[in-house]
Image (tube, rainbow, N blue to C red):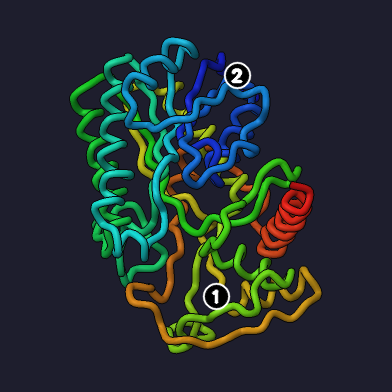
Amino acid sequence: MSDLAPFPVLVTGGAGYIGSHAVLALQDAGWPVAVIDNLSTGFRFAVPDDVPFYEGDVADEALLGRIFAEQGTRAILHFAGSIIVPDSVADPLGYYLNNTVKSRTLIAAAVKAGISRFVFSSTATIYGMSDVSPLHEGLPRDPINPYGWSKMMTEQMLADTAAAHDFDYCALRYFNVSGADPLGRSGQSTIGATHLIKVAVEAALGLRDHVAIFGEDYPTHDGTGVRDYIHVSDLAAAHVLALEALTREPGRSLVMNCGYGRGFSVREVLDAVDRVTGRRIERRQQLRRAGDPASLVADTGLIGQTLPWKPRYDDLDTIVAHALAWEEKLGEMRRGA
């Protein structure tokens, strides 16, 4: 727990994968927290019983006003949104509505209520197909899909709002989020998820018959795409530290990458799952997917200089082991339902 006097925080999308871990991190650090989630992709069981829960949409201004009044909200951690890149290409207007238009409503409601601290779930997808590696925050924002654009537009709205109002924000640009709460309290529960480690663990448990490797001719050490995999609990901890930073030094806003600064290839991830589970996953080679860069690895210099963030789970086998434990628990929950 920090030396700050904690105040009430609202987590949007707090029944989802990353949001639920942020709720746990806030609780563990002593912050009063409430959740709003429309349960379109989240799960009610992911929110602890002692956390006030509001089922609804972040575009519902009346509901937001009621939550702010009832909870005394003084900060927002914003995770609610849609995250599947191919879906955003197929349904761009849906993504702009859900990720951008509704974020605008939430930001406006926060300003109206005098809520001056806002931590935003952004993405490395904002960098597009940059040839630079590792990726640093000074690079141009150049998304190549509606998902990336929808997040970039929200970042811009936050910057413009901070310039015009008593309002400070932190946008954390995620790389590949993986793993699960080490205590088994939450994890990635979405059916049909597209995260590689989740998919590979499901395959190891017999829930899928193979894992596809999209492309083997990338200019990487083994020909497959390289990604920076960050443990979801380390990511959640960074959000709490970002909130503390905004509180300690009002009048500044932050935009930072959130990764480990080290990448693993698709083959290396699958080998790690084989190692941890003791089972051999069937691999099936497929053509590259359009828009997949060869490598996405974070330059973590800025977050390291700005926050006292010390990742605890920076180990691929540990990430896989936590994902496996959650998947096994999820299976038990579903069988017991």
| Residue drawn at the location 68% of the way across and 45% of the way down | 181
* Label located before the other in sequence (2 or 1): 2
141 or 183, which lies in front?
A: 183
- State whether residue 45 appears in this view: yes
Of helix, strand and loop, which one carries label 2?
Answer: loop
Which of the numbered marks, if any, corresponds to residue 3? 2
Of helix, strand and loop, which one carries label 1?
Answer: strand
Which of the numbered marks, if any, corresponds to residue 265? 1
> What x and y, as percent, mark residue 77?
45, 32
Horizontal arrangement in the rendering, residue 7 relative to residue 333 (left or right): left
237 or 190, which lies in front?
A: 190
How many C-alpha atoms fall within 10 Å of the one at disc 1: few (<14), some, or many (≥20)? some
Which amino acid type is shown beneath numbered disc 1?
A: Ser
The quadrant in which residue 136 appears is bottom left
Horizontal arrangement in the rendering, residue 182 relative to residue 92 (left or right): right
Rounded to the nearest angstrom, the CA distance separating label 2 from label 1 is: 40 Å
